[in-house]
Image: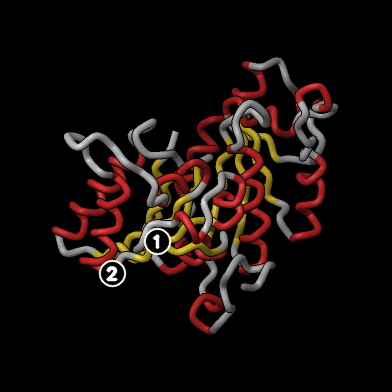
Amino acid sequence: MNFGIMINEGPYNHQASDTAYLFAKAAIEKGHKVDRVFFYHDGVYNATKLTQPPQDDRHIVNRWKNLATEHGVDLVVCVAAAMRRGIVDDNLSPGFRISGLGQLVESGIQSDRLVVFGD
Amino acid sequence: MTEATGGIEMDEDSSGTIKKFMFVNRKAPYGTIYALESLEVVLISAAFDQDVSLAFIDDGVYQLKKGQATKAIDMKNFSPTYRALEGYDIEKLYVEKESMDERGLSEEDLIVDVQVMSRAEMADMMDEQDVVLSF
C-alpha cells in the first residue's frame, strides 16, 4: 500500500510526529511505500535544522531526514504555515522541501491512504 | 509555484482521479489556528476538481456561528470565507445535530446554509469518504 502522511503538531511538545515516524518506519519495513509526509500547522517545526535536543534524547528532525535519505520519502513543509512560524530555506533541514498545500491534496489523490497525525 | 494549486503543476496524473475529500472541523474558530489553516486547505482543494465536503462537529460548529466579533482579541474574523465557499463549488457543509444541541445552537445561528445530520448519519458520511482530513 502507498501511504501519504500528514503531521499537524510540533516535535517534542506533542507525540504526533513520533507516532507518525514510527508508523512510517513500520510501514516501510512491512514492504509498503510512504511517498510523502506533509508538515502543516506547528508540524512545520519538525523541519528546522536549528533543533538541538539533549544528547540522550531522540533527534526528531534528523530521524525524518534519515528516513527521507534512506527510503526516498518526500518531506514537504507547507509554505504558508512555515512563513508564519519563521521556517524558511535558511533554517530548513536537509531532506525537507518547502512547497504549497497542493502537495497535500495531491498526496490525498495519489496515495491509497492519507493518514493524519495531530491533536 | 502556481498560487491557485498550491505548488502543483496540473497534469494528467492528478487531474483524472476524483476522490471524496472530507474536511472535519472539530475546534473553535479562535484559540488555536486549526480552523483558519483548515480553511486554507479547503480553498486549495477546490482547484483540484475533487468531491469536497466539510463536516462540523464538537466545538467546530462554532466556526459557523453568526456574529463573530474578533476585534478585541486582535484576530481577523474569517467567518465570511465560509459564505464564499459556494463560489468555489464547495457546497456540501454538514453539521452534526448533537454537537449543536450540546452547545445550545440551532441552524438559525449559522452564517451559511448547511445540512444538519445526526451523529450516526455523520459516521456513515465519513465512512463513504476516500480521504478524511481532521482538524
In the depicted structure, whether residue B128 falls above or below residue B25: below
Q: Which residue sits at x=71%, y=15%? A: B104
**Residue with the mark numbered 1:** A96
Where does residue B52 sit, x and y in percent of width and height? 61, 56
Q: Secondary structure at mark 1?
A: strand
Where does residue B9 sit, x and y in percent of width and height? 58, 78
On the rendered structure, is B134 left or right of A25?
right
Please indicate, yes or no, whether residue A112 appears anywhere in the rendered image: no
How did the renderer colour the structure? secondary structure
In the rendered view of the protein, which quadrant contains the N terminus of chain B? bottom right
Chain letter belonging to callout 1: A
- What mark, if any, has residue A72 been given in the picture? 2
Of marks 2 and 1, the one in the foreground: 1
Name the residue type under label 1: Phe
Where does residue B18 sit, x and y in percent of width and height? 54, 69
On the rendered structure, is A37 left or right of A33?
right
Name the residue type under label 2: Gly
Q: Quadrant of residue A117?
A: top left
